[in-house]
């Protein structure tokens, strides 16, 4: 389908829900993936200005995650234009995407909808080096650090009294103290952000319920790639999830599949496939913000070159530019 057909689906969703639909997709195509990042705030602002103030706005979202501070700014921005904000989840909305959902009045999940934990991995200059590539710093997962110390504490009754101290010293030998400090700061940040996001909802949740949601999403799921289906989201975590009925589920899935096909999310980006001769320029879209008024793509631009030195048949890829581009 082309944009006119997508707009038709968005309008059908809008009529069914009494809302206006705004799509935000961060592509997870192999080799050209995108993530939630601050640069999208201005793009979404442009769309919201064209849409104007509406009684209800639905954000159609697909993402593997990204910057954890961006959702806070995005939700506050969208709420400048509506009194009722909902997120539509046809498929994946992980990590920072789940955090964004916490600020919505409704989280509308289709049958394939998935949320995820919000315990980010932290990377900074003090993180351990990758043994196979010393120029790369290994991410440190927040919950891995706390789980390690919890393991020591739980088994302290069969160990010496100074076990926890020695375990912490061993950890510091492997991970720089400032990297560990950064882990703790981000742990506090993500919990604080989650509570603040839940506080943006029109219908307030009780403190105990909010605490249960935050604890589940930051501590109790044990695996960062745990996929939370809508039944678990409602019955175990207590999230304000609404089940999309069959008609809405079909519309949401059709819209997602069209965007998936256009951005080729299920196909790895293979530079050798687009090479013609010794050098080929390329542009590839890997993210989308779309409303009835306009479409913006996140585009990678660059060149693919064949090099026969030092090894014959070598393919070099150079990304010259990347960023959001309006198509109309």
Image (spheres, helix red, strand yellow):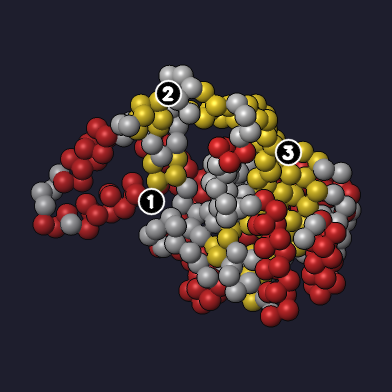
**CB under 8 Å between discs 2 and 3:** no
Q: Which residue does the image show at 59% across and 68% down from the upper left?
A: 113
Mark yes or no: residue 134 visible: yes
Earlier sequence position, callout 1 versus callout 3:
1
Q: Is residue 158 left or right of residue 173?
A: left
Mark yes or no: residue 194 visible: no
Q: Which residue does the image show at 88% across and 52% down from the upper left?
A: 293
Camera-near label (2 vs 3) is 2
Q: Which residue does the image show at 48% across and 58% down from the upper left?
A: 117
Question: Which image quarter holds the C terminus?
Answer: top right
Q: Which mark is residue 311?
A: 2
Q: Secondary structure at mark 2?
A: loop
Q: Is residue 6 left or right of residue 218?
A: right
Q: Is residue 39 left or right of residue 118?
A: right
Q: Position of residue 75 (x, y in %)?
A: 70, 52
Residue hosting label 3: 324
Residue hosting label 1: 143
User: How far is mark 2 from mark 1, CA to CA?
Assistant: 43 Å
**CB under 8 Å between discs 1 and 3:** no
């Amino acid at each position: 389908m082309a944009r006119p057909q997508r707009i038709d689906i968005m309008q059908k969703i809008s009529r069914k829900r009494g809302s206006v639909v705004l799509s935000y997709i961060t592509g997870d195509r192999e080799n050209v993936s995108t993530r939630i990042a601050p640069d999208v705030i201005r793009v979404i602002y442009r769309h919201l200005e064209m849409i104007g103030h509406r009684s209800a706005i639905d954000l159609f979202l697909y993402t593997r995650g990204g910057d954890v501070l961006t959702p806070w700014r995005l939700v506050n921005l969208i709420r400048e234009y509506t009194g009722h904000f909902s997120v539509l989840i046809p498929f994946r909305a992980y990590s920072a995407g789940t955090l964004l959902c916490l600020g919505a009045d409704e989280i509308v999940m289709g049958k394939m909808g998935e949320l995820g934990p919000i315990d980010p991995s932290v990377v900074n200059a003090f993180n351990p080096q990758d043994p196979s590539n010393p120029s790369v710093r290994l991410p440190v997962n927040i919950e891995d650090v706390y789980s390690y110390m919890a393991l020591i504490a739980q088994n302290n009754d069969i160990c010496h009294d100074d076990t926890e101290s020695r375990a912490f010293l061993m950890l510091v030998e492997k991970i720089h103290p400032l990297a560990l400090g950064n882990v703790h700061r981000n742990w506090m940040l993500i919990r604080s952000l989650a509570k603040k996001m839940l506080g943006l909802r029109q219908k307030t949740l009780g403190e105990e319920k909010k605490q249960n949601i935050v604890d589940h999403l930051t501590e109790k799921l044990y695996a960062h790639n745990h996929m939370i289906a809508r039944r678990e989201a409602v019955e175990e975590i207590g999230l304000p999830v609404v089940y999309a009925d069959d008609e809405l589920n079909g519309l949401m899935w059709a819209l997602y599949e069209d965007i998936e096909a256009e951005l080729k999310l299920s196909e790895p980006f293979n530079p050798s496939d687009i090479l013609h001769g010794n050098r080929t320029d390329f542009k590839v879209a890997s993210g989308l913000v779309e409303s009835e008024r306009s479409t913006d793509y996140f585009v990678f631009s660059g060149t693919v070159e064949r090099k026969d030195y030092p090894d014959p048949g070598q393919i070099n890829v150079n990304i010259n530019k990347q960023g959001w581009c309006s198509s109309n």
